Amino acid sequence: MGIHRVLGLFTCVMIVIESLDSVKTDETGPSPFRSVLFTRNRRGFPERGGLSSDSLANLRELLSQLYNKRKGKHGPTNSKGPTKLQKGAGLQKTSESDVIRMVDHHGRNAFREADKENPRTSQTAEDLLEEDTHDIHPRPVQPARGGGSSRRSFLRGEHLLWTNGTIPYVINGNVGEECRKEILASVELFHNYTCIHWEPYLGRGGDHVEFFTGGMSSSYVGNIQVSKYGHLYKPKLSSQPISIDSRHCTLHVVLHEMSHTVGMTHEQSRSDRDRYVTVHWEHVLGGEGNQNLAKEDTENHDVPYDYSSLMHYSAFAFSKDKEKTLEYKNTDYEFLGLRENILSFYDIEDITKAYKCAHACNETECQNAGYMDMTCSCRCPDYLQGPKCEEVVTGGCGGVIELEGPTDQLTISSPGYPQPYPAGGNCVWLVKAPRGYSLELTSQEFNLPDNSLNRCSHWLEVRAMLIGQPGPLYCGDSLPMITTESGAESHLLLLRFDSSNQFVDTGKGFNLTVKTKIDFSQSNGSTDSSLSDDAINHCELDPNWCYNGGTCVFDKGEVSCSCSDGYSGDFCEHSEHLKEMPENPDKDFPDKGIYSCDPSTACQIRPTSAEYAWTVKEQGLVVTPQSRGAQAGFTVPFRITESRDMCLEFTLRRRDPDRPCGELKVMKHVTGADFGYGGYQYDLPLYTGGCGGTAGVHSATLSPFVGESITVSFTATVAENGDFNMVIENISITEGIC
């Protein structure tokens, strides 16, 4: 059935249901028939046939599935070649890809469309799984040569690169016409977005590749130099082969194999991959011997790890039991492995830098993750523009916002907030902090409409991993706290609010807070060269940078600690007198389960002063007796040991609004084991405050390193009038990160 007949069928069905005068389509939504289903109610037509909104939503879903089944997996062939992109974009298929990016939040529950897209329930994911599983990469047999400068997912060694970026090719006669079109479309994409030139082989000898189809997709990584080493292979090679699985000759697969030939290895094989994915070898075909999921020796400077890379496998790749083999550290981004990705924004940067495509360009400092491309202009992430990527592309709302310093913050609201926002808009905000900081996004209110299928009608896209990488689309009645990923782009956050669907009721919108945080992964010793001219003075940012009374020194971009007598170490964490100190009095504290102190029922604490005691009064802990300048403290009788992330939470209340308050200080006490380098002890404040705005719930995450244990103490210093005037209502230490 042709595509026009399918559209005619759908139109007939809709007319029967709706009796509309005209049919409109909404290309921005997840279904091409979204506007048809909502037009009549917006015009004030009465309901017909007793169809509820849920029934219409379910019908729309069934019709959308029928449409997809009829039109075929890849849609009609584009006889004019690949689709042209806006300047700066990576190459990504966008047909229906918005659907699996959606994350519908209600309270603490999250409904991810990507969770439904797995090999047990989705034909699309099944196909991707099969494509990944039939992708192999034989090793070259010639002697390896080290050295050279390569980038990111390129294996070490410039001998793997093709001279002048030129790759002669020939297409074998066994390649069918449709597959030949995909190969030629891939060649054009490389020509349009990189300086790699795939040229027809003229038969004059020399290194070249040959495309042919078979039962599996495979290619060598880089130039194996068949003109020199082809005789070493069995059978002997006269050309470098690129095999395409005849059952999966798609643009995605062809580009993937060609990128290997260019020199790229798999993204999940990068040497830094353990920060981003966990490999579950127990579910992998061939176990740890499967080289497609093995970690390689790669150079990772300048270009970040990219979940959206053409070279990244799906979460179920090479699974022997349909369980996940690659677990993403941030599950909201698993949808990126379920799309037929083409060349991403960072893939293009990867190739550009490896082959020095912009080597002859005048130096221009591209901003906001942009980079100089082969045209000697800045290639910008989606929704950014300008000669240096310094502007946002937006529909009359949004803009570029810059934060300064460690405590700066701002509020971002939907148009018209606190009134419901108007439909039909598209807002983009780029939030920037100084390098060396990360950004934290929280919501005071969040209300964007969804439907009974937990799909978003309007959404907020949050690009917190990389701003050049597609982000999850959030809707519902809540938004989780989101922190930008540590790394070269941790100081950048891009938000895109899409309310372009005008055929649904709008929500109240959102009121968000963005604030800066220090990104400790980019402190001294970072290998990120982009930070070399922007060193962070931690002495100014963190008064407790050095432990045990040490003095912080910042000199020529380096931070060090000048330690007091008897202490040593980078942070003055080692005590020369540790072995002479009495045994840790907290060693007998329980370290299993959780801790809870509710003064209205039961609360176990260990006072540190016999003169001043904490007692239960007014359903909380208060200090009695009290005298000017006195201190009264207690230790929580609970010990957090290594390999446990736990959350300390306590609630404060002011007793008398007309009287001054003293000060409460909450400290964590860290003891590290002696593994031959000397044990250590140090204290760090978790909270210091008096009255004012300190009432309410406060929390801190406690995560001991290997060999460490942590205890917590509370110390009150009463005010000048002898009054502490604060009540601690409850204290808890529970599993998880706050």
Image (cartoon, rainbow, N blue to C red):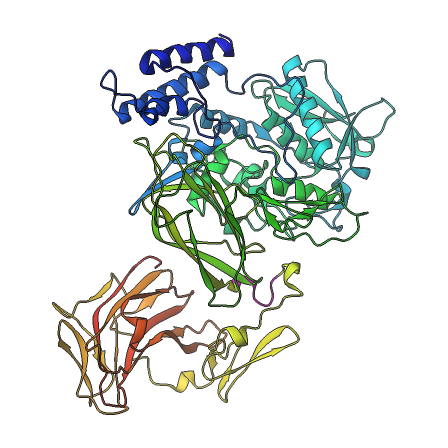
Note whether residue 586 is visible. no
Decide whether residue 280 is among the magenta residues.
no
690, 273: nearer the viewer: 690
Note whether residue 258 is visible. yes
> Where, quadrant-wise, is the C terminus in this rendering?
bottom left
Relative placement, left or right, of 183 versus 416 is right
Relative placement, left or right, of 645 versus 268 is left
In this view, 46 is above or below 312:
above
Residue at 65%, 59% (x, y): give it.
530
Range drawn in magenta: 521-526
Decide whether residue 525 is among the magenta residues.
yes
Q: How many marks?
A: 0
In the figure, residue 268 lies in which quadrant?
top right
Residue at 44%, 74% (x, y): give it.
674
Relative placement, left or right, of 157 versus 486 is right
Prevalent SS, magenta region: loop
- Judged from this view, the residue extending furthest toward the front is 44
- Judged from this view, the residue extending furthest toward the right is 204
601, 289: nearer the viewer: 601
Residue 348 in percent (x, y) is at 66, 40
In the figure, residue 12 lies in which quadrant?
top left
- Judged from this view, the residue extending furthest toward the bottom is 628
146, 258: nearer the viewer: 258
392, 415: nearer the viewer: 415
Residue 524 in percent (x, y) is at 59, 68
Residue at 59%, 39% (x, y): give it.
266
Residue 464 in percent (x, y) is at 49, 50
Relative placement, left or right, of 136 versus 357 is left
Residue 444 in percent (x, y) is at 34, 54
